[in-house]
Amino acid sequence: AQKITQTQPGMFVQEKEAVTLDCTYDTSDPSYGLFWYKQPSSGEMIFLIYQGSYDQQNATEGRYSLNFQKARKSANLVISASQLGDSAMYFCAMREDLNYNQGGKLIFGQGTELSVKP
Amino acid sequence: DGGITQSPKYLFRKEGQNVTLSCEQNLNHDAMYWYRQDPGQGLRLIYYSQIVNDFQKGDIAEGYSVSREKKESFPLTVTSAQKNPTAFYLCASSPGLAMETQYFGPGTRLLVL
């Protein structure tokens, strides 16, 4: 079974509008972390935002916020006021505490390609 | 400027050849990782290292080897045993193995001639 599911292969958004990228996850570990990364066409993975499973509040970093709904096992990324430079692939990833003996590996989703229209 | 560097940016491998991808970090991080990304896919873990002179296999270690002789360096060798090496390879590091964020280098694209 997929541990991280991103159901939107591609998304379009108008410049200056907000967009939500979906991510659902599956884990039986009570302690885990959720991450979002941006991958522009150059290939580098750029860290955007982190949410811990015990965090009471949704994480925010500038124009990025994470809509964390623990009971639904979803961790959607919200980008406010989209810019042309936001066009990229976006990956949701999870680390489980149970994976400590596996180096705390990141488990990635398939990604969502976001295109921002002028 | 602290960060992670990977070289080369592009690498070509002939059949039966071993090639080595370089990864260096000056973030003073203890943990380092190698991931492989295939087109249209997320990343998969090849190897990781928690400390110098120690490393462990990830999910897809077959056909790869690593070393960790220095804290700053974690080179990956793609051996001739790796039958489908064409992919994008990303190196990452984190302060430790707890829930710290992993930071990535710019990647190396490996192509087979």
Image (cartoon, rainbow, N blue to C red):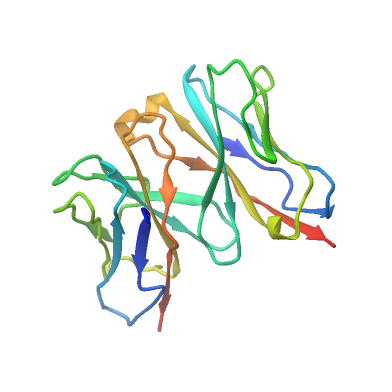
| Residue placed most toward the observer, A97 or A13 | A13
Pinpoint residue A58: horizontal percent, then vertical percent. Answer: 65, 24
Pinpoint residue B6: horizontal percent, then vertical percent. Answer: 36, 64
Residue at the image point whose x is 47% and y is 20% from the top: A29
Please count the marks in the image.
Answer: 0
| Residue A48, picture quadrant | top right
Residue at the image point whose x is 40% and y is 25% from the top: A97
| Residue A34 appears left or right of A87 | left
Residue at the image point whose x is 40% and y is 84% from the top: B113
Q: Is residue A97 visible?
A: yes
| Residue A2 appears left or right of A97 | right
From what the image shows, is residue A14 above or below residue A57? below
On the rendered image, what quadrant is the C terminus of chain A found in?
bottom right
| Residue A73, picture quadrant | top right
Pinpoint residue A78: horizontal percent, then vertical percent. Answer: 73, 38
| Residue B47 appears left or right of A38 | left
From what the image shows, is residue B65 above or below residue B71? below
| Residue B41, picture quadrant | bottom right
From what the image shows, is residue B70 above or below residue B39? above
- Outermost residue on the front side: it is B1
| Residue A12 appears left or right of A76 | right
Q: Is residue A1 visible?
A: no
Pinpoint residue A84: horizontal percent, then vertical percent. Answer: 75, 60
On the rendered image, what quadrant is the N terminus of chain A found in?
top right
